[in-house]
Image (cartoon, rainbow, N blue to C red):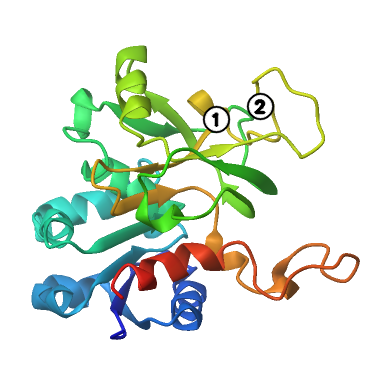
């Protein structure tokens, strides 16, 4: 198995790039943090990579809307890069702010920019920044990054993470295509009638969506942070419970590496 090369894109305001580099390296990739300006000056850098990751943070201060300015920079300076990267059979992962960027560029849901947007990530129903750990359920088997994963426990940290589709028809189409790949779920042991109330659904996402993949399953965006739980000491109760050495988030990065085996 050759070692896949990975680019973790940095931009003004991103703050999870080094954690993501670390997670990819632990998973067996050869990651490199690349600044947006460097990639814009030399788009050929992407040709040597198999994995492109847009990490979390607050790119460009989340001015206008979360991820909007970075998405615009892609559209203006690198208009074809994301689609070309995907169409070459490679993988794209957007975490939190990276998810917000991917959905605003349209690479996750076609024709998804401006007034014709089919889906977006809106402000949390709570009206505040949500920083908490959540339980997650994988839905379907379409997403490469979630292969073999059934459930996860990961942290979220965002103010604009509510997944909203333009109408129920679009929501049904995404659901039937297996694109609503990751959902918030109730705390294990809690009785449920199918609903996932706040704070277990921390933002009020429709159908409890925490992550979305494109039709190929090779482009994936999620609000929770898998890079923040790759080792047991990152778990909030690691001193009080018997936590496995490898955190739940590691499998997301391992799946990306194993895809190229």
- State the residue at coordinates (24%, 28%): 117
- First in residue order: circle 2 vs circle 1: 2
Q: Position of residue 144 (x, y in %)?
A: 36, 55
Residue at (28% x, 86% y) in the render: 2
For label 1, the SS is: helix
| Quadrant placement of the C terminus | bottom left
Q: Which residue is drawn at the image coordinates 47% and 60% (left, top)?
A: 57
Picture quadrant where residue 256 is located: bottom left
Query: Closest to the observer: 112 or 179?
Result: 179
Going by the picture, which residue comes out furthest to the top? 168
Locate residue 17 relative to residue 232 in the image: left or right.
left
Q: Residues within 10 Å of mark 2 (few under 14, many from 20)?
A: some
- Name the secondary structure under disc 2: loop
- Which residue is tagged 1? 208
- Seen in the picture, residue 206 relative to 150 is either above or below; the reply is above
Residue 218, compared with residue 135, is above or below; it is below
Q: Residue at the spot x=35%, y=51% of the render? A: 220
The residue nearer to you, when weighing 20 against 189, is 189
Coordinates of residue 121 in the picture (x, y in percent): 41, 35
Q: Is residue 237 visible?
A: yes
Q: Which residue is mark 2?
A: 196
Q: Would you say the residues marked 2 and 1 are in contact, meaning their CB atoms lie under 8 Å apart?
A: yes
Give the residue furthest to the right. Answer: 240
Whether residue 63 is visible here, answered yes or no, is no
Question: Left or right: 176 with respect to 56?
Answer: left
Measure how far apart labels 2 and 1 are at the Cα level: 7 Å
x and y percentages locating residue 11 in the rendered image: 33, 67
Q: Quadrant of residue 228?
A: bottom right
Up-down relation of residue 189 to residue 61 (above or below): above
Q: Nearer the viewer, residue 66 or 152?
A: 152
Q: Is residue 234 left or right of residue 10?
A: right
């Amino acid at each position: 198995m050759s070692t896949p090369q990975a680019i973790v894109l940095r931009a003004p305001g991103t703050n999870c790039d080094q954690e993501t580099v670390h997670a990819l390296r632990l998973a067996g990739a050869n990651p490199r943090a690349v600044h947006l300006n460097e990639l814009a000056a030399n788009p050929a850098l992407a040709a040597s990579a198999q994995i492109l990751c847009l990490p979390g943070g607050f790119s460009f201060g989340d001015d206008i809307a979360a991820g909007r300015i970075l998405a615009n920079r892609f559209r203006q300076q690198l208009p074809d890069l994301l689609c070309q990267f995907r169409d070459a059979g490679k993988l794209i992962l957007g975490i939190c702010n990276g998810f917000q960027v991917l959905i605003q560029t349209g690479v996750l849901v076609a024709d998804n920019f401006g007034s014709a947007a089919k889906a977006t990530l809106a402000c949390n129903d709570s009206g505040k920044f949500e920083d908490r750990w959540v339980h997650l359920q994988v839905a379907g088997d379409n997403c490469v990054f979630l292969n073999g994963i059934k459930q996860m426990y990961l942290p979220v940290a965002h103010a604009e993470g509510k997944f909203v589709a333009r109408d129920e028809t679009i929501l049904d189409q995404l659901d039937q295509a297996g694109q609503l790949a990751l959902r918030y779920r109730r705390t294990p042991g809690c009785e449920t009638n199918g609903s996932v109330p706040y704070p277990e659904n921390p933002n009020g996402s429709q159908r409890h969506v925490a992550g979305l993949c494109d039709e190929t399953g090779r482009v994936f965006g999620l609000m929770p942070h898998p890079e923040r739980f790759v080792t047991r000491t990152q778990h909030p109760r690691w001193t009080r419970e018997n936590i496995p050495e490898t955190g739940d988030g590691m499998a997301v990065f391992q799946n990306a590496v194993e895809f190229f085996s």
